[in-house]
């Protein structure tokens, strides 16, 4: 396998890992938090938001942004952009600001946060899955 093929395989795998993480949040974590009182759910999510900022997550999340940037320049534009835009840009400009607001507000914000954050998380999951598939298909 060439170096380019190795990069593509690693990028596709990382996109798949991120798709799985977002999928788990969409189908288990957020519905589970929805069953809790707002104060407990908000506190749990705040703790998750702190714990997820760890070296392994950041290596996959940001490292794959670099790899997908390389993929764009190698001609796999769809796969690379689906990850960069649908995962990284969306996370930084939608989900992270919502997480920051959750940190600074009271429990009244929780229902809006839960609904909106989860919808955008679904988008991230689909974008990462589509990134993985299109990278593997060479697009």
Image: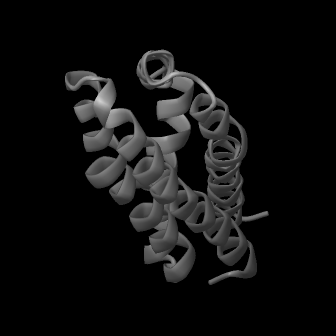
Q: Report the residue at 62% width, 57% height from top.
A: 11
Res. 101 in view:
yes
Q: Which residue does the image show at 42% across and 17% down from the upper left? A: 39
Report the front residue among 84 and 1: 84
The residue under the point 30% across, 35% down is 109
Residue nearest the viewer, comparing 127 with 41:
41
Q: Nearer the viewer, residue 11 or 30?
A: 30
Name the image quarter holding residue 62. Answer: top left
Q: Quadrant of the N terminus?
A: bottom right
Q: Is residue 32 left or right of residue 90?
A: right
Count of all numbered marks drawn on residues in the image: 0
Q: Quadrant of residue 99?
A: top left
Colour treatment of the image: one colour
Quarter the C terminus occupies: bottom right
Q: Visible in this render: residue 69?
A: no
Residue at x 67% of width, y 31% of height:
32
Residue 29 point in image, percent of width and height? 65, 34
The image position of residue 117, as x and y in percent, is: 43, 48
Q: Which quadrant of the view contains residue 69?
A: bottom left
**Residue at the far left in the pictured view:** 104
Vertical comparison of 139 with 84: above or below: below
The picture places residue 131, in percent across and down from the top left corner, at 61, 69
Q: Is residue 128 above or below residue 29?
A: below
């Amino acid at each position: 396998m060439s170096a380019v093929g190795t990069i593509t395989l690693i990028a596709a795998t990382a996109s798949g890992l991120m798709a799985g993480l977002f999928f788990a949040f969409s189908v288990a974590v957020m519905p589970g938090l929805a069953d809790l009182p707002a104060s407990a759910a908000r506190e749990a999510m705040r703790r998750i938001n702190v714990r997820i900022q760890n070296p392994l997550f950041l290596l996959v999340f940001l490292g794959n942004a670099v790899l997908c940037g390389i993929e764009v320049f190698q001609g796999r534009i769809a796969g690379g952009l689906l990850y960069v835009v649908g995962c990284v840009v969306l996370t930084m400009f939608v989900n992270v600001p919502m997480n920051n607001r959750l940190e600074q507000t009271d429990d009244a914000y929780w229902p809006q946060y839960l609904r909106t954050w989860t919808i955008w998380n679904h988008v991230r999951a689909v974008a990462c899955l589509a990134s993985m598939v299109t990278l593997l298909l060479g697009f």
